[in-house]
Image (spheres, rainbow, N blue to C red):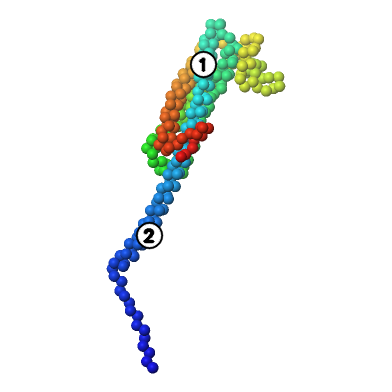
C-alpha cells in the first residue's frame, strides 16, 4: 500500500493584501489616538470651565468684600480728620479731649484688614494647570490679578506702617487708664465701640501737652490719613474693573446667574 503525503498549497499574498492590512492597523491605531485625544480635550475643557467657575466666585467675593469694607475705610478717614482737627484745637485751648480720646482709640488704633481671594490663581499655579486656560481674555485677567495681588500686598504693608507709626506715637499722649475707666464695664467686659469716652462727665487729661509734640502727632496722623485716602481711592476704582472681568468671563464661557444669584454652568 502506497501512502501519498497530502500536498499543501501555499498561496503567496499579494502586496495589496499587505498594504490593506497595514492600512487597517494604522486606521485602528489612528482612530484610537483620536478618541483618546478627544477625550483628553473634553476633560481639559471641563477642567478649564471649572477653574473659570471658581475664578468668578473669587471675583464676586472680592467685590462683596470691597463693598463691605470701603464704607468703614471712609468712616476711618473722617474720624482721622476729626482727630487731627482736635489736636490743633488743643494747642489753642479749644479741644474736647473726650472726642480726642475716642477718635484716637477708634479710628487710629483700630485697623481695617482685609484680604482678597487668591484661591483660583494659587490652584492654577501650584498644579501647573495655567496652560488649561486658553481664552485670551481669561489669561489677561489672571495675569492682571497676579500683578494686582502683589501691588495690594505692598500697599497694605505700607498702610500698616503708617497706621502703626501714628498709633504708637499717640500711646505717649493718651493715658491708658482713661481708656479703662471709660470702656471697661462693671462686669469686666470691654466696650468694643470705644465710645465710653463720649459719656464721660469730665474731660480726660493728656499725658503730654507740649504743642510741638502734639503738632508732630498731627503730622503723623496726616501722613496716615492721606495714605489711607489714596489706598481707599485705588480700591474703589478697582470695583468696576472687577465687575467687567466677571461679565467678560461669563460671556466667554457661557455662564449665567440663576434667580438666587449663584453661578452655574450651561
Q: Which mark is residue 78?
A: 1
Above or below, comparing residue 194 to residue 153 in the picture: above
- Give the secondary structure at mark 1: helix
Residues 56 and 227: in front is 56
Residue for point 38% across, 35% down: 137
Decide: few, some or many residues near mark 1? Use Cα within 10 Å; few <14, some 14-19, many ≥20. Answer: some
Q: Looking at the image, can residue 198 be seen?
A: yes
Q: Position of residue 263 (x, y in %)?
A: 49, 35
Whichever of callouts 1 and 2 sits on the residue coming sooner in the sequence is 2
Q: Position of residue 256 (x, y in %)?
A: 46, 35
Q: Residue furthest right?
A: 187
Q: Residue furthest front?
A: 259
Which quadrant of the view contains residue 86?
top right
Residues 61 and 173: in front is 61
Residue for point 43% across, 32% down: 247
Above or below, comparing residue 163 to residue 21 in the picture: above
Residues 39 and 58: in front is 39
Q: Position of residue 11 (x, y in %)?
A: 31, 75
Q: Which mark is residue 28?
A: 2
Which quadrant of the view contains residue 244?
top left
Q: Position of residue 51 (x, y in %)?
A: 46, 40
**Mark pair 1, 2: CA separation:** 75 Å
Residues 211 and 240: in front is 240
Quadrant where the N terminus sits is: bottom left
Residue for point 41% across, 33% down: 248
Q: Looking at the image, can residue 128 be seen?
A: no
Q: Nearer the viewer, mark 1 or mark 2?
A: 2
- Give the secondary structure at mark 2: helix
- Report the side of 251 relative to 83 (left or right): left
Residue for point 41% across, 43% down: 132
Q: Which mark is residue 226?
A: none
Amino acid at each position: 500500500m502506497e501512502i501519498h503525503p497530502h500536498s499543501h498549497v501555499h498561496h503567496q499574498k499579494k502586496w495589496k493584501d499587505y498594504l490593506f492590512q497595514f492600512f487597517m492597523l494604522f486606521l485602528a491605531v489612528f482612530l484610537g489616538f483620536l478618541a483618546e485625544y478627544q477625550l483628553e480635550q473634553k476633560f481639559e475643557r471641563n477642567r478649564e470651565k471649572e477653574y473659570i467657575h471658581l475664578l468668578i466666585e473669587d471675583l464676586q467675593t472680592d467685590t462683596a468684600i470691597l463693598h463691605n469694607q470701603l464704607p468703614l475705610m471712609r468712616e476711618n478717614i473722617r474720624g482721622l480728620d476729626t482727630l487731627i482737627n482736635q489736636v490743633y484745637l488743643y494747642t489753642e485751648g479749644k479741644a474736647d479731649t473726650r472726642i480726642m480720646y475716642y477718635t484716637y482709640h477708634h479710628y487710629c488704633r483700630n485697623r481695617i484688614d482685609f484680604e482678597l481671594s487668591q484661591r483660583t490663581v494659587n490652584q492654577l499655579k501650584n498644579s501647573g494647570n495655567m496652560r488649561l486656560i486658553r481664552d485670551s481674555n481669561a489669561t489677561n485677567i489672571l495675569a492682571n490679578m497676579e500683578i494686582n495681588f502683589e501691588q495690594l500686598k505692598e500697599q497694605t504693608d505700607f498702610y500698616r506702617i503708617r497706621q502703626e507709626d501714628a498709633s504708637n506715637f499717640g500711646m505717649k499722649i493718651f493715658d491708658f487708664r482713661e481708656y479703662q475707666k471709660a470702656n471697661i464695664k462693671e462686669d469686666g467686659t470691654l466696650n468694643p465701640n470705644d465710645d465710653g469716652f463720649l459719656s464721660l462727665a469730665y474731660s480726660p487729661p493728656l499725658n503730654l501737652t507740649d504743642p510741638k509734640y502734639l503738632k508732630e502727632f498731627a503730622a503723623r496722623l496726616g501722613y496716615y490719613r492721606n495714605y489711607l485716602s489714596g489706598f481707599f481711592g485705588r480700591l474703589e476704582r478697582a470695583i468696576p474693573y472687577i465687575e467687567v472681568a466677571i461679565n467678560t468671563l461669563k460671556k466667554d464661557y457661557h455662564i449665567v446667574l440663576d434667580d438666587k444669584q449663584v453661578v452655574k454652568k450651561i
